[in-house]
Each structure stands twice: as structure tokens, then as C-alpha cells.
Amino acid sequence: MKFLDLQAQLQRDLQKSRCRLTAGPDIEQPEQLPALILAYIGDAVFSLHVRTSMLSVEANKVHVLHTLLARMASAGMQAQALYAVEAAGLTEQEQAVVRRGRNAKGRVPRNAKVADYRASTALEALLGFLYLSGRQERLQQILGQLVDCMCEAMASETEGSLRT
């Protein structure tokens, strides 16, 4: 299977799997949790969504699955996806969670740009907030936007590298 075909299949499967995550726990006021805790939960939500969605693409090739997940979970890719989600529109409450996540103080890995890492944390905080507040429909909508953006970015990167 060619890489571009794999990406197209992945995008179709990720779109179909939007409803796989079950409703999150009913936390009284998830907006009161620290932004890094929201990001911690959001990272798990995103990872689980992508991992379960990719099973139908390359179920027998763990290395391929890991490589795709690592690329989609990278700070740069998540930052790019956050900008697309912000452009599509967020509620005031979602914007506040994103702002808190972006301003959260955490250690930035050496292999990430500070701005990308902060945006990635903001995105994960938003996902964690939506999950913990039980807003499954909105969570699935945003996960779909993220996947679309990431698949487009990976496809354009692949096309660019094939031309050179």
C-alpha cells in the first residue's frame, strides 16, 4: 500500500470513528482544574482516538501505527491543527480554556519550539476540558477538524518531499 493511499484510508477511518469515545466522567467544574491536568487528559483522549481509528488501516504493523501517531501527536502538528480549529471558531469558554492551556507553565522538550509546545498544550487542554465536561458532540466535531487538518498537512508534506 502506497503512503498516500494509507493516508487517504486513515482519514476515512478516522472520520468514521468519531463516535467511538464514550462519554467522559461527570466532573462538576472541569474548567476549575489546572490547565496541565486538562492537557494530560486531553493527550490521552487524542491518543486513544487516533490509535483506535488507525487499527483498520494497518492493524498488523505496530511500527507504522506508532510512526503515524507520533507525527500526529507532535507539538508542531498539533499547533498547526489548533490554529485551524481556532479559525473555524471556538466558544468564549473554549477560548478561555485554550488561553489557559497556552499560558500554562510546563517544561518544553528540547525537540519542540516553545510556541508550538504551548499551542499543543492548549489544544490538549481543550480536548481534556470537553471530555471531562461530557461535551461529546463538540469533542467529536473538534477531533474531526483536527484529523482533517493533520491529514492534509501530512499529505502536503509527503507531496512536497516526493517532488524534491
Image (cartoon, rainbow, N blue to C red):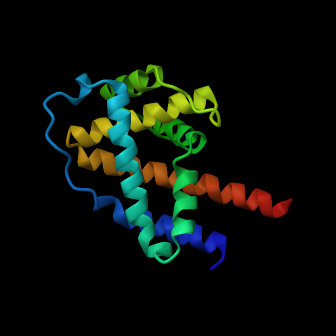
Quadrant assignment for the N terminus: bottom right
User: Which residue appears at 55% of the width and 32% of the height?
Assistant: 117
Identify the residue at image location x=77%, y=57%. 160
Tally of marks = 0
Residue 41 at what x, y percent from top left? 32, 40
x then y, percent, for residue 114: 60, 26
Camera sees residue 66: yes
Residue 9, horizontal then vertical, whole percent: 52, 72
Vertical placement of residue 71 versus 78, above or below:
below
Q: Who's the residue at 37% across and 67% down the image?
A: 16
**Image position, residue 14 (x, y; %):** 43, 63
| In the depicted structure, whether residue 84 falls above or below residue 15 | above
Q: Is residue 111 above or below residue 2?
A: above
On screen, 145 above or below 164?
Answer: above
**Residue 21 appears left or right of 112:** left
Q: Nearer the viewer, residue 148 or 99?
A: 99
Q: Extreme right residue here?
A: 164
Q: Name the residue at 49% across, 73% down.
A: 57
Split into 4 quadrants, where in the image is the C terminus?
bottom right
Q: Is residue 22 left or right of residue 85?
A: left
Asked whether residue 15 appears in the rendered view, the answer is: no
